[in-house]
Amino acid sequence: MVTMLEDWIHWFTSLEFHQICLILLPILLIDAPRYAVGSLLMCIGDIFYDLMKVFIRCKDPQYDHCPSVCIVLAGLNEGETIGDTMESIWGTYPRMEMVIVDDGSTDGMFEVVERFAESRDNVICLRKTERGGKSSALNMALPYTNAEILVCVDTDSHLGPNAIWEIVQPFKEANVAAVSGAVIARNPFVNLTTWLQAIEYLRTIFLGRMLSDRLNLLGIVSGAFGAFRTSAIKQVHGWDVGPGEDGDLVIRLRKSGYRVKFRPYAQCFTNLPVAVGQLFKQRRRWDWSVVTFECRKHIDLLNPFHSSFTASNFFMVAERIVFTIFFQFAFWIYTIWLMFNMHQNVVYILLLNYIAYTVLEIFQYTAVLYYSLDRKRDLKIGMLIPLVPIYYLFLRTATMVAVLEEMLTRRSFRDNFVPAHVRSATWHW
């Protein structure tokens, strides 16, 4: 092992600068500019801002906006978890009502909801006799509330302290139609699969969306925890058929001229897939939407002559297409080329890429810890950073499979995430 390391050091020190750049090209073109550079610059700027607040004694922002809120919970066979979810939300905000939609459950979920509603006012229980999918269930709740803000929460999640207060504050601005909360792992230490996802969520959702928000490029509100202006939802006629209905809705709101915001401290703790197969299936479903929505349904946002065209919408869609599709193909093509043309040093090349990627992750995770509300927990989560480069190869594989099958076969419209009778009646973008 020592001899191999010495050989690698000798090989590395013999390389010229342009050769190192060539070997690290995917990292330099894809991961560094998309994640690390922007996140680190944002963090450095905020450190200086926080230091300035100490010297000029700025007051911390207060919760001064209190619109009426309707919590919408839509679920299928979530009888074991929905009780805890409702308990974690109820009473955490003054002007609150709750609408729960049972999307054709067979596990007694509706009975759990009814028992919860018996002793509480402003809780409405709705039941669908036939499953219609998440979009259908969320749309069913719309006529039953006049609240200013709809807050959608997954039925297997619980909210952190002051999460509702946090997520409604941006709505004081009249042009804000949607606000995303931060989704955090509730079960990070079950096994390696959940542990690595927990790192990913902190890096891409907690930190990454913070940056997207600052750049006005946020194109997603997490289905697990997101808030919407009710009048804006009705203006765009609610949710379209999924999968990916949360991202589609946000793009339609942006096309209508609204802004989308992110609140990192409006936190939702959700259960992550514990099996590798479940995770792979989930990520395929998520990545289908890039082809379905950005490349088909909302491709008009790239047209400068379209009425919905704005610079921020253009860059939002272009960023998704370039990094999720074009650079994914480029990554695998370049990797194959590199292996064939430098096969005599393949182990050294892999080790160099691994070290570079790990260093990049450490820098980004340092920014995560700066913003963290629970540094002890997040520091423990970050202990598996040395495995993250391998994990992201797995995610790249899932993305590549999803993009190819959606491009070639429109695979999303055969997925059981949406019942057959619903997906057969909708437009196949």
Image (cartoon, helix red, strand yellow):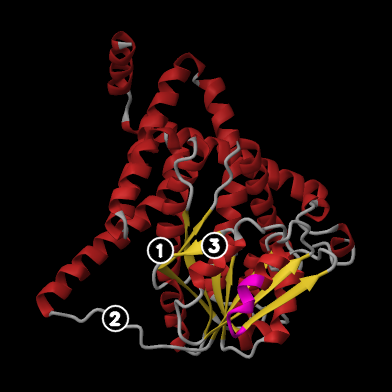
- In the displayed structure, would residue 301 be above or below residue 293? below
Q: Which residue is mark 3?
A: 84
Write the start and end of the magenta stretch as one range.
115-122
Kindly identify which numbered label has been placed on residue 211.
Answer: 1
Q: Left of 51 or right of it: where is 395?
A: right
Label 3: few (<14), some (14–19) or many (≥20) C-alpha neighbours in 10 Å: some
In the rendered view, tell whether residue 302 sits above or below residue 37: below
Residue bearing the label numbered 2: 61
Quadrant of residue 222 in the image? bottom right
Q: Sequence order check: which comes first, mark 2 or mark 3?
A: 2
**Which dot marks residue 409?**
none
Q: Is residue 120 magenta?
A: yes
Residue depicted at 54% across the width and 60% down the height? 157
Where residue 151 sits, quadrant-wise, is bottom right
Question: Quadrant location of the C terminus?
Answer: bottom right
CA separation, marks 1 and 2?
20 Å
Tell me, yes or no, whether the two marked residues, 1 and 3, touch with CB atoms within 8 Å. no
